[in-house]
Every structure is written in structure tokens, then in C-alpha cells.
Image (cartoon, coloured by chain):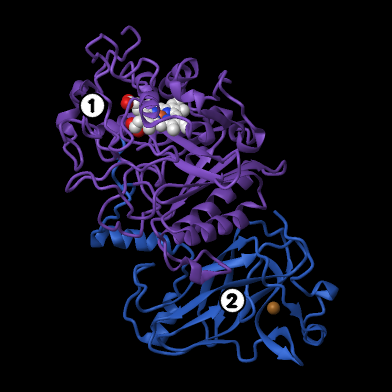
Chain colours: A blue, B purple
Amino acid sequence: MTDASRGCDGLGRSRNPQEAAIVERFMKPLRAVVSCFLLLALAGVAGCQAGADQSNSVRVQDSYAKVMPKGTMSAIFGVITNDTDADVTFESASGDVAAAIELHEMVSDGGTMIMRKKEGGFVVRAGESLTLDPGGLHIMLIGLKQDLKAGDKITVTLNLAGGGTVDVEAVARDMANAQESYDPEAQSDDEGGGGSTGALAGSRPVR
Amino acid sequence: MSDRSPVSRRGLLVGGGLAAAAAGAGVGVAGVNVVGARGDASAPPPLVDFYGPTQAGIATGMQAHAVFNAYDLLPETDAEAARRLLTLITDDSARLTRAEPALNDQEPYLATVAARLTVTVGFGPPWFDKLGMSVKRPAGLTELPSYKIDRLQPAFSGGDLILQLCADDLLVLSHAARQLTKTVRGFARLRWSQHGFSRAAGGHVPHGKDRTSAPRNLMGQIDGTVNPVAGTPDFVAVVWSTEPGWFAGGTTMVLRRIRMELDRWDELDAIGKELAVGRRLETGAPLTGTLETDAADFGATDSSGIPVIPNFAHIARAAPREETDRFLRRPFNYDDSSSTVPTDAGLLFCTFQASIQKQFMPVQQRLAELDNLNDWTVPIGSAVCALPPGCAPGGFVGEGLFS
Ligand code: HEM
Ligand SMILES: [Cu+2]
């Protein structure tokens, strides 16, 4: 028989530390822990227990991507936290969900916000976090290979300057925002693959 | 009195050996059911855990506000899509109920307070058929027959997916409802939305030093007195399903929108109103007692042999005849306009029980046949759904449908 009082009494309950740890672990399902290699290289950590230590790591949490149809563009957002003692730089991203994956920023171009490749990649200072969000930094997905439907989970990899990777697992969300238009010049220079679909705006989200 | 309950209120608690085990807080006050759905005099903590073996928003003390939303699945929503939908609803709900913004929350500052927000997920009967999972339909989920008192409007009835959202703060509730609407819209179309309210957060009617009454409804009655008490074995037995398989720890919900004919209710004097229910307006006490928590004595007669609580009184008809015909009532008021004539207001009568057929239907059938209150109340909406068990962090509500 079920314990009726648990979690449902409306009076809240205090969790013991062990329970809190379990809850904490499950509540951040999208967290990615930096590879052992990186930890060793950057922070001089002597050992690396799989997934156990989040206090000395680089991780990406609360990642989500915009629901978009196959062949169009989308973007991934989230929070990158650097709990190591050294700054980290992500110089690129890779994965098989899109024809091309780039690190982007938004800049003002004569009053209009446009997005373009982020020179020098994403830098996350030691002990700080970097938020990727609509209207700001994002991981650009160009030429989606599949429909990205609400609730789909996709994974891309962030590549660190000097080696090492961090996986980003993002869940697709039905978003009215993230309508940034792509900078046409940067696009023709760099990719050419996006063509005139170079905007998250206009296309109808798929379900 | 032939149609009177053979089971005394006290017998229900003490019988079945439940009383000894029911040693939790709030039980044992003269062996009377102290209402489970009542607010507390001290301010309750603002967070109600979304996760747990059973869903929140059922055993939770009643919040000040509720929104019930029913959705119809879009034709293209199949089982795989439904699974994605449930993971998204779970993620939004878990975050919002712990006072965190949802992912891509457009108004994150509205999410910094949770005000005892709960989100409770239910599946109407068509959910199972449309998604090709009829075998998963719980035995406890039964469509209600049409009762002769019913004047049901489709605009308040049915639904494939039903969400109950409750909170003590309407701003918090509005934000949560809108966030979930955005999450659901790619999968299902809103069928109806109903807003209900109880008393203000922390608001209560003092009854003596350390007792508060159940909330009042718009007829002025204290409503919710006789109810299973959260945290007791009795509550567990009444509310949570023990069906073998995925639905254990789930329950069912019946939501009836019942219009109150308040303009005609105004024509009654207090004595007429009290006879219609069988309880006093001021104290909520049965006509045979002095305190709200006194058990009603349906056998008591006055000096001329007339029952003190009339046979046709609401509580005389609604009181259980057996161990089984009982459920949890968690009723909210609705007020679409108390400023028009006729008044458009009433009750979002909401119940939870393991089995609709065994527990709810016998009582509703009796009330449809005879209940003095029917002269001033009309059911105008009706919906039923199965509420799956709760989930643990990392899982999602309704995951048992897919195993
Ligand atoms: C607008 C409609 C209704 C109003 C205003 C109303 C009001 C009340 C009031 C004032 C009480 C007494 C206090 C209490 O124990 O909570 C009561 C008791 C009760 N009502 Fe209702 N009610 C309504 C509809 C219904 C319906 C539709 C059902 C069931 C299908 C129902 C089932 C019960 C039950 C089971 C009790 C407790 C009876 C007992 O064992 O003493 N009520 N109601
Ligand atoms: Cu971009």
C-alpha cells in the first residue's frame, strides 16, 4: 500500500542529506560532466570517479533547443558552469544532429540584432558560469537532420581549446522566442549551406 | 428510518481496525474525521514536493485557488508524442513547484514564489483509446451515467488530458497555467478551463482555541467536514488505487461543475437552509450536535417523532451506506459572475477515489434520486480522469503507461 503522506501532505518535509543528494542528482538530468582528461589537465585532479564529483568540473545544465523542422536551423541554450580553478575556452561544437554546429553570439548591426560566429569561442571563467540564452550566446544548429519535436532530446559536444569535450544534452521546447535573424554576410562567408532559411523566425515549429 | 446509513460515522473510523493505526495528527479528536482539506492556522510552507509515490494536489491541504484545464489530443499525437508531452509537463511542474522558472520561462520572475503550487496530471477515458493503450485503462476509471438532475454543457465536460493546478497565490497560478499551456499546445487543444477558489491563504474560521473549520462555499455552508484525513490508513484506503500493475498509487478524479441557484437560495430563511443540508450554517455542526466535528445522529427524532435531520437532507442522503461508498472531497467555488442576475456561481465539486464506480457512483445515484439541495443546485459540467501515481526525480508522471 502506498504511503499517503509522502510528499503530498502539503506541509513540506525536510530531506535527509542522502535523500537530498539523490534528488539533486536526478533534478539535473541534463548536466554534462567534463571529461576526465580535462579535469586532470586543468585542475590537477588526481582521480576521476565517473559522474560523482560536480564540485570540480565543467558542466552544462538546463539545456534546451528550439523546436524546428528538419532542414532548418535551431539553437541550443543552457548554463555552462566552470567549477575548476582555471578559465576554459570552448572553441567549437560538433555532433550529428545538424549539418553544421557553430558557437554564436548576437550583436547589434545598425540597431538590428544579428547573430554571427563568436570570435574566440565561449570563455567560461574559473568558478563562474556562462548563460546561453535566446538573444545572446547560443550553440547554432544549421541544417537539422531530423525534425526537432517538443520533448526530443539531442546531444552535441562542446570542444575545448587544447582538447577535452563536454557533452550537452538538450531537450527541444516549443518556443515563441529565439527568432533571431542570421547575419547574411557572415553566412555567405562561412557556411553557404543555410541559404535563405537562415533564420529561426518564420518557420513553423513542428510537433 | 429505512434508508439511513447502517454504518455510523464512528464505526467507519473505528471499524476495520483503522483507528488504532490512524494515530497521525488530526485524528482521534473524539474519533471524528477532522477534515483533511482544511488550511492550517499557521502559515504553511510554500513548497509542495512534485515528486513522490503519489501525485501532489490530492492529499495536499486545499490551496486558495485552482485551475482545471482539459485538453483534447491532436490527431497527430500518438503514444510516442504523449510520452514526450508527459516528460515536458513533469519538467515544467517540478521546476515551478520548487519556485524555479521553467526552461525558457518567458517570465522567470513570476516563478520565484511557489505558494504551495501543485500540478496534478489526469487522463480522461479517451486518452487510453486514442493512444492505443486501452489495456492500460485503470478499472477504477468509469464514465458517469447521465443522471436525471444533469444539465451538462459540453463546454465544461469531458477531456482527454486534465491538469489540476492549485496554489495560494493567483499570480503564481496564472503563470504556471500559462507556462503549461505553452508546453501542451503542440500536442493537444484546450477543451475547457475552469477557475476555482477556496478561502484566502491562511484564512480560517476559528472554532474554539485550536480548531479551524473546513472552508465555506458560496451558499455559506462549511463544506468539507466529513472527509478522509490525509496521512491516515483510512485516507490511503479510500483514495489510492491498489490495482495490480502500473496504476497502484494512482487515483481517479471526478469534477462536477454544479451551479448554485443563489438567487432562489436567498429566498430561504436560515432554518430552511439548515434543513436542506442537515447542518448549522454558523458552526457547521449537524442538527443533532453542537460542534462541526460532532458525528451526525441520523436516528435522532424530536418530541413528535420527526427526524431532527430530515431524510431528504443532503448529508442524510450523502452519508455512506457501506464501507466503500466514500471518497475525498476537495471542492472549490467558482464565480463567473456574482454581479449578474441570475448569479453565475457555484461549486467545482472535485472528488478523489480509487474507484469511481464503487465509491462515487452509488452516492451520486442516491443524490440524483433524492436530495433537498437539488432544489438549488444544477450539475452543468462533468469530467472524469485517472491520475497516475507520482514519479521520482528522473522519471515522469505516467511513465507506467509505457512500460
Ligand atoms: C453544489 C453542490 C453541493 C453542495 C453545496 C454541498 C454541500 C455540502 C455540505 C455543506 C456538506 C456538509 C459538510 C461536510 O461534511 O462537508 C456536504 C456533505 C457531503 N456532501 Fe455535499 N454538496 C454538494 C454536492 C455534493 C455532491 C454532488 C456529492 C456527491 C456526489 C456530495 C457528497 C457529499 C458527502 C459524501 C458529504 C458528507 C456526508 C456525510 O457523511 O456526512 N455533495 N455537502
Ligand atoms: Cu545563431
- Residue at the far right in the pictured view: A196
Q: Is mark 1 within 8 Å of ligand 1?
A: no
Quadrant of the rendered image containing residue A156: bottom right
Instruction: Categorize mark 2 by other alpha carbons within 10 Å: few (<14), some (14-19), many (20+).
Output: many
Residue at position x 51%, y 40% from top?
Answer: B122
Q: Identify the image quadrant of the N terminus of chain B.
A: top left
Q: In the depicted view, which residue is nearer to us: B202 or A136?
A: B202
Residue at position x 53%, y 61% from top?
Answer: B175
Q: Report the chain holding disc 2.
A: A
Instruction: Categorize mark 1 by other alpha carbons within 10 Å: few (<14), some (14-19), many (20+).
Output: many
* Same chain letter for marks 1 and 2: no
Q: In the depicted view, which residue is nearer to us: B261 or B127?
A: B261
Q: Is residue B344 above or below residue B316?
A: below
The number of callouts visible is 2
Q: Quadrant of ligand 1?
A: top left
Tell me: A116 left or right of B285.
Answer: right
| Residue type, label 2 | Asp
Report how far apart the C-alphas of labels 1 and 2 lie in the structure: 59 Å
| Residue type, label 1 | Ala
Q: Secondary structure at mark 2?
A: loop
Q: Report the chain holding disc 1.
A: B
Res B295 label:
1
Q: Is residue A179 above or below residue B33?
A: below
Tell me: A122 left or right of A179.
Answer: left
Residue at position x 43%, y 54% from top?
Answer: B167
Residue B346 percent coordinates (x, y) = 51, 38
Residue A79 percent coordinates (x, y) = 50, 75
Res B38 label:
none
Q: Is residue B118 visible?
A: no
Q: Which residue is mark 2?
A: A133
Residue A202 percent coordinates (x, y) = 79, 67
Q: Secondary structure at mark 1?
A: loop
